[in-house]
Image (cartoon, rainbow, N blue to C red):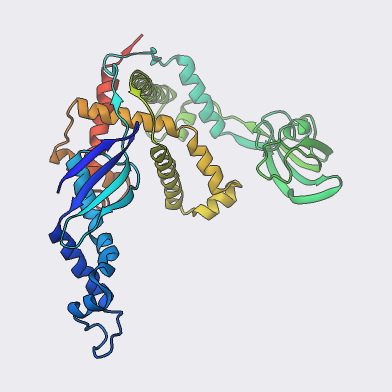
Amino acid sequence: MSAKWEKKGTNDGELTFEIDVNKINSGLDQAFKRVRKTLNVPGFRKGKVPRQVFNRMYGEAALYEDALNIVLPDAYDNAVKEAAIEPVDQPEINVEKMEPNEPWVIKAKVTVKPEVKLGDYKGLTVPKQERDVTDADVDAELEKRREDQAELVLKEDGASEKGDTVVIDYKGSIDGKPFDGGSAENYSLELGSNSFIPGFEDQLIGHKAGDDVEVKVTFPEDYQAKDLAGKEATFETKIHEVKTKELPKLDDEFAKDVDEDVDSLDELKKKIKADLVEKKNTAADEAIQDAAISEAVKNATIEELPEAMVHEEVHNQMNQYLGNMQRQGISPQMYYQLTGTSEDDLHKQFEKDADERVRTNLVLEAIVKAEDIKPSEDEINDEIKNLASEYNMDEKTVRQTLTNDMLSHDIAVKKAIDIVADSAKEA
């Protein structure tokens, strides 16, 4: 096969290639076998019409379109490899020449990956990261754990305060008319949790059990239920109970209750500090990696991003996100219903940073080429084992799902990230 690539624009061009006579004849044979099954010709049983008879009646050219559909995918793939291009979208195919007993000539309009001109990507300067864990950090974490262990006790006479929980009935109305989802009975609401419409919880602060409170609020303009967005509502609210948090004492018994692996408060503090150190170091490493990659992308030059790549990135992110939801038992339809959103809303959400994600991927792939990173068979096998463990799958299923090329690509990109991040300098 002879393939010729001619660049026509920044990321577009024309790929001209031939399909040789042997492949054409093979395609014609397959096309005839398919069409023969449907033919009704007098004197012949269905499906038994000889090729010569078909050619006399219809002409061999009647098979050309079907034959082209059969042989084109492999011919195009081979031409792409020969021309050493990387298409990012479906080609626009035009038949240039289709004569009997001669190679067919095909022209394809193709959009390819853009050229990446790398700038500096090693030894980049990134912001200094805070890794120290102070006693105040440990105390704050201890306080969170005390909050988690807190018990709610009835507040007999005192008025409600921020942080208290009230048990309420409420009936909401707009212009005197009730609306769907606007009422509940014996609902437990923590004041200050910001789980209700802005302003609702504040109006219950300072009240006691038995009080009736008329709460007036305005739904936010961006409220998910569009029929309520921006409207004023009144909630007739009855407070049945006010409960306050009773925090446990900060002592050895508390330490044992929250962590069965420790015997004293001092041990708990040491363990918390070690955990916080690990988390801070992980967060710092991730921040350095993100900053270094971002800087490497800024230093690179990409003249123009193909629109097809951006669209594909958006759909990949959507599919991955909805796939994660389905693994939790939530179908796409259920997700849209629960969140009050639509497929278009999710599409717009992932559109926001799609350009930057595509640029980042292209730069990392360019670094893979520049560094000549080629994962070994052992590294691919290790990646399969890691993925099988992470997603609770057997290795055979992982191998069937992901090709070696896909695995090799992901491993190489991870190595490129390490090269950029590990060489970065904090300042």
Please indicate whether residue 56 sits to the left or right of residue 286 in the image. Answer: left
- In the depicted view, which residue is nearer to us: 239 or 410? 410
Whether residue 379 is situated above or below residue 23 in the rendered picture: above
Say which of 110 and 62 sits in front.
Answer: 62
Q: Residue furthest right?
A: 176
Q: Residue at x 28, y 19 (%)?
A: 121
Query: Could you tell whether 50 is left or right of 391 in the image?
Result: left
What x and y, as percent, mark residue 153?
67, 37
Residue pictured at 37% horizontal, 24% vertical:
290
Above or below 16: residue 145: above
**Residue 282 quadrant:** top left
In this orientation, which residue lies closer to the viewer: 293 or 24?
Answer: 24
Residue 368 in the image: x percent, y percent?
23, 29
Q: Using the rendered image of the protein, determine whether residue 61 is visible from the camera's viewpoint.
A: yes
> Which residue in the rendered view is the most extreme toward the top?
427
Where is residue 421? Give x, y as percent: 29, 21
The residue drawn where x is 57% and y is 48% is 342
Task: Using residue 384 as the reference point, say whether residue 174 is left or right of it.
Answer: right
Which quadrant of the figure has residue 148? top right
User: What residue is at 32 percent from the left and 35 percent from the top?
Assistant: 8
